[in-house]
Image: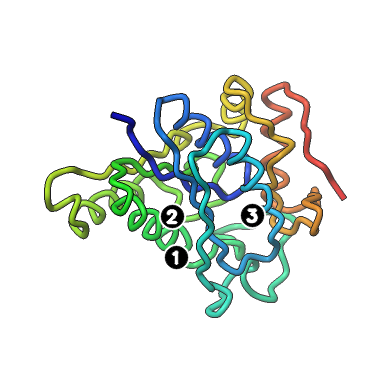
Amino acid sequence: MTRRAVVLVSGGMDSAVVLAIARSQGFACHALSVAYGQRHVAELAAAERVCAQLGAVEHKTVTVDLRSIGGSALTADIAVPEQGGSGIPVTYVPARNTIMLSVALGWAEVLGAGDIYCGVNAVDYSGYPDCRPEFLAAFERLANLATKAGVEGRGLRMQAPLIHLSKADIVREGLRLGVDFAATVSCYQADAAGRACGRCDACRLRAQGFAAAGAADPTRYR
């Protein structure tokens, strides 16, 4: 019997690698992207490319309007910082990963999928509280308390295969699995064509990852 998994795919490099990993582990991957009112839609176009290239069974985009509540440089008229600071950065989107995983959880129940994959990372993660192992463990407990599947004993597992990897390790794993990083968009303020600014925290971490891995950086910059 084919095992099904729901894989959150943002269009960035990390989620592309996660999709490749889930496929390599034998899962039929149902890819989920969320249009949450983010600053640009280039990453959603990138998600479509990635899902097509990496053989997702299907790709669904769900709309959740987080711009209506704002509170982040990615969902409100707040400038994206171009150098890191202390504390949780203004690019943190309140409750984003909780909401995205909740949507993925609902779809997993409908599909009868026992695994939900996401690209959270606790090494190069910009200080976001919802990218920590503690968060994933707590969400898995919630998932198994709050769902029919969990109550009936079928169980749901949160899979975060990149959680302890550096960006360089993620690059190496992606290259090993044939990920086309040129198809991905990581920049917080990419233009309509998906070209990166080269200055924000996401761009900095991405560039450092390719450099540390000794791999060519295929990112298109403005």
Q: Is residue 128 left or right of residue 89?
A: left
Identity of the amino acid at label 3? Leu
Q: For mark 1, what is the residue?
A: 95
Q: For mark 3, what is the residue?
A: 44
Give the Cα separation between the discs numbered 1 and 3: 19 Å
Q: Could you classify mark 3 by the number of other residues whose Cα lies within 10 Å: few (under 14), some (14-19), or many (20 or more)?
A: many
Q: Is residue 157 left or right of residue 168?
A: left
Q: Could you say which disc has been placed on residue 180 in the image?
A: none
Vertically, is 100 above or below 171? Answer: below
Locate residue 36, reporting x and y percent.
Answer: 56, 66
**Cβ atoms under marks 3 and 2 closer than 8 Å:** no
Q: For mark 2, what is the residue?
A: 130
Q: Nearer the viewer, residue 150 or 162?
A: 150
- Mark 3 / mark 2, whichever is N-terminal: 3
Q: Residue at x 81, y 53 (%)?
A: 193
Q: Is residue 197 left or right of residue 152?
A: right
Q: Residue at x 41, y 25 (%)?
A: 25
Locate residue 128, reporting x and y percent.
Answer: 50, 55
Identity of the amino acid at label 2? Asp
Identity of the amino acid at label 1? Ala
Q: Could you classify mark 1 by the number of other residues whose Cα lies within 10 Å: few (under 14), some (14-19), or many (20 or more)?
A: few
- Mark 1 / mark 3, whichever is N-terminal: 3
Locate residue 136, reporting x and y percent.
Answer: 35, 48
Q: Nearer the viewer, mark 3 or mark 2?
A: 3
